[in-house]
Amino acid sequence: MIRSYPYSQAKSPGLLKALLFAALLLASVVTSADDGEGFPAWVSAVRQEALALHISPQAVEATFNQVSYLPKLIELDRKQPEFVTSFSAYVNRRINQRVVNKGKQMLQDYQGILYVVEELYQVPKEVLVAFWGMETNFGGYMGDIPLASALATLSYEGRRAEFFKRELFDLMRVVEREHYYESPITGSWAGATGHMQFMPSTLLKYGVDADADGKIDIWESYPDIFSSAANYLSQAGWQPGKPISMMVALPPGFDYSLAQLQANKPVSEWVALGVVGIPDSILSLPRAAIILPQGFDGPAYMVFPNFDVIMQWNRSVNYALSVSLLSQQLRQDMYTLAMPPEPPALSYQQMWALQEALNAQGFDSGTPDGFPGGKTQAAIRRYQATQKLPQDGYPGIEIFNRLTAPLP
């Protein structure tokens, strides 16, 4: 649903015009591909592109045999929970006593395989099981949407057309390599598949035939499942024996503009700035950042290069912190996680309007897309500086109301 913004929320006629334009543009984006009228012709053209890339005709035919347009996926793409859910709500839905207990049971049930994989790739078994829990509830639900239809729909829709088209071609290459000609590969609405929800390109590049049966099976072979995930993390730069994240305390008067994922400093420099709660064992680490997932008045986390590795898997701070927190809970004897409450996150439409409002007032947040990326956070910090507010870059309801409220 497209949210409408009343006239009373506009700070000026110029801003009102910008917000109305944003709503109209968003409406056109959502509806332009929903009818799918041009989808059959698009599929025909992509078939020819695939053949020109020397993908086998059998793989192309098997991939497109029952492909269909799925307009519901467009709505899901604009409501990804990693980006439109508050940190506390996101964590509380995914990490609880039941999940931790099940994760510990999985560690026990697959301890032999996990031991071998950890020794080989130097990625902790608790981290692998945390990914497993986050992605598919430990294999409980891997998705039942035909991947060809999901990737074709999202490529045809256009928001990230080239990305999803490349994944569609790689799906054909997976079909060709693994000889999956009889039944379609299924997975999530976003085109990921298997226990660890690999995109086709990830499966092609990092998949491991650990059980040496001649195929890479991330659906039923647990050696392949865990080895493929560990291989990805290892090649992405995992640092054995180093932390992912830890909660820290910030001193009074801390400069919140320093709390951002890109602002790395040696741990010793953070200590010199008054950050406390850091164990002596990591004081010599050369690189760490501080992030504030609930803004300046919420918890502060120090994150390390292994956090960046997780962000390569999923570009969401909420997701990466949740993997870290779940892996920590799996190592502990008792469940101890408690997230402080916070207001709901801005909706996709509100975020779009916030970005338009920032742009209209001279704080460049880039082309509005409804997602709180780094450029949007930087624009919020610049706005906060002009208002003498803590420069945490947090896109919350207070900033939204300030930027869209009428002038006195």
Image (spheres, rainbow, N blue to C red):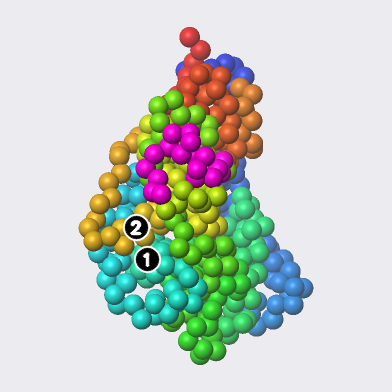
Within 10 Å of disc 2 (Cα), the crowding (few <14, some 14-19, many 20+) is many
Few, some or many C-alpha atoms within 10 Å of disc 1 (few <14, some 14-19, many ≥20)?
many
Q: Work out whether 64 lies above or below 10.
A: below
In the orientation shown, which residue stands out farthest toward the right? 52
Residue 208 visible in this rendered orientation of the protein: yes
Along the line of sight, the residue nearer the viewer: 3 or 234: 234
Q: Which mark is residue 328?
A: 2
Where residue 344 sits in the image (x, y, percent)? 37, 37
Mark 1–mark 2 Cα distance, whole angstroms, equals 8 Å
305 is higher (above) or lower (below) than 191: above
In the rendered image, residue 57, in percent from the top left (x then y), is placed at 69, 81
Residue range of the region highlighted in magenta in the rendering? 263-280
Q: Which residue is mark 1?
A: 126
Q: How many marks?
A: 2
Type of amino acid at the residue the image marks with label 2: Gln
Mark 2 or mark 1, which is nearer the start of the sequence? Answer: 1
The answer to whether marks 1 and 2 mark residues whose Cβ atoms lie closer than 8 Å is yes
Q: Position of residue 233 (x, y in %)?
A: 52, 66
Q: Please, what secondary structure does the residue beneath circle 2 have?
A: helix
Is residue 135 positioned above or below 293 on the image? below
Let me know if residue 242 is in the magenta part.
Answer: no
Q: Residue furthest bottom?
A: 213
Q: Quick check: 392 above or below 140?
A: above
**On the image, which quarter does residue 86 sit in?**
top left
Place of residue 380 in the rendered image (x, y in percent of width and height, measured from the top left): 54, 30
Type of amino acid at the residue the image marks with label 1: Glu
State the SS at label 1: helix
Query: Magenta segment, principal secondary structure?
Result: loop
Residue 273's label in the rendered image is none
